[in-house]
Image (cartoon, grey):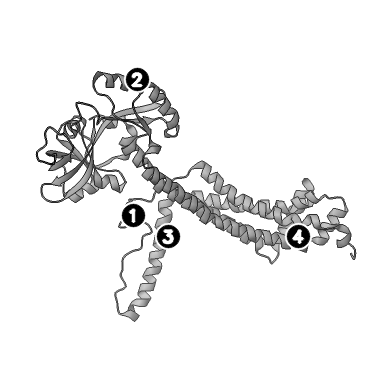
Amino acid sequence: MRWIGFVAMRYFRGRRNSNSPAPVLAILGIATGVLALTVIIAVMNGFQLGFIESIIEISSYHLRIESFPEGERGEVLREELGALPMIASAVPFREIQGILRGWERGQQGVVVRGLPPDALERDPGMAGKLVFEKGAFRLTEASSILLGAELAKRLDADIGDWISLVSVSAGMENATDESGAANSRFLVTGIFRSGFYEYDLGWAFINLDRAGVLSGGASAGEDLFLGIKLKSRWQDRAGIEQVRRTVGSLRVFSWRDYNRAFFGALRTEKLFMFILVGLIFIVVGLNIFQAQRRSVLERREEIGLLRAVGATDMAVRLIFVWDGFIIGMAGAGIGMLLGLLIAFNIQAFFSILEGLVNFLIHILNIIASPLAGVDAAGEGFAIFSPTVFYIKEIPSRLIPYEVLIIFLFGFFSALLAAWFASGRVSRTRPAEVLRYE
């Protein structure tokens, strides 16, 4: 193996110092592919995991128990569930479909969720997702209501304003019209932002007991749910088995059962992005394959000499595979380092990129404005403009096993290309090559 590495390094240095740019281009191609795929997947993970975590932490929970009993039996079950080793928290809640109306103007269909006043203390995951721009999470009063930031803007409501909730629920004892609609007044005590537009526009929180009165099912307990957070949401199957042994016949659902189509669409989107960007590696691999085939043809005499002095087919083949190993390791390593550097400093990277683009646009406007007779000033360019994307900053998340997969894609694209290209070595006959030497 020592002489194989020695000969391979001499061949590689000889190719690097020659006029052929193939090794450098191959390394740059792999580095570019690894860099692009790392940054793209990091940003995509940031968006997707932000949405998924908002849904799980605020809406669906990790597990959900329907028709959870109230009273003494419910308290006993909650204590038993809280003692299970896999469960981190358990919060009862109710949901109402209704219409919120501001006193001045505006109305909006909403999902109103009833929560206990200490919900955020019980559920740190939800507390981490709700950022209160005004007020605080205060549901101690029966008339308190918390609004999403976009919902408050739609209703033109602020802290201390009174708004009206029209809740439609069959069989309500306090219905005020023929359709069963109940109009109740609420005082805005908090305005939150979750980062998920659907919740910021269409969700509100009220007191749990008040929600039971409005839904008309408080006495029967049929409208009460128990949202459970696990210590690890990926262990939901095992968690369901533990919970079912405790609650008996009550229906238990996992977060995978809610928004299944949405999660599936996100997974498909990431898969196709992997495939599209991975085409870079195929192109680079073909380039390496052709370069290695040419190298094998150019070194037929040297291969014949090595075979004549006793080198086996596999030993000579490994010389050229070692060349691909160096290209793959160098390209994937450089690309991964740059990709991680950008992914962990994504805000600065996009700020610099936007600055360069805006500078070029400004120069072009200055050149074009005398010819067109227009003002050179214009609106600045933004890759993720807040007017288009519902974000305040660009998210970036890296998952270790995906980073490893990207690195291996780049590395093996060069290694496999070199392996298949070196297959011509086995067809080289020393007697034919050295006949006229």
**Where residue 313 sits in the image (x, y, percent)?**
80, 51
**Where residue 411 sits in the image (x, y, percent)?**
62, 50
Q: Which residue is mark 2?
A: 80
Q: Which of marks 2 and 3 precedes in the sequence? A: 2
Residue closer to the observer: 277 or 13 = 277
Amino acid type, label 1: Phe
Quadrant of the image occupied by residue 19: bottom right
Disc 1: CA contacts within 10 A as few (<14), some (14-19) or many (>=20): few
Q: Which residue is mark 1?
A: 389
Q: Is residue 436 visible?
A: yes
Amino acid type, label 3: Leu
Left of 20 or right of it: where is 426?
right
Q: Which residue is mark 4?
A: 296
The residue positioned farthest toward the bottom in the image shown: 371
Residue closer to the observer: 175 or 228 = 175
Check residue 353 in the rendering and tell me which mark sits there, or answer none: 3
Left of 345 or right of it: where is 95?
left
Say what secondary structure mark 3 lies in: helix
Residue closer to the observer: 252 or 412 = 252
Say what secondary structure mark 4 lies in: helix
**Where residue 396 sits in the image (x, y, percent)?**
42, 48
**Where residue 315 sits in the image (x, y, percent)?**
79, 49
Disc 3: CA contacts within 10 A as few (<14), some (14-19) or many (>=20): some
Left of 398 or right of it: where is 291?
right
Q: Is residue 39 visible?
A: no
Question: Which of the two marks, 2 or 1, is nearer to us in this view?
Answer: 2
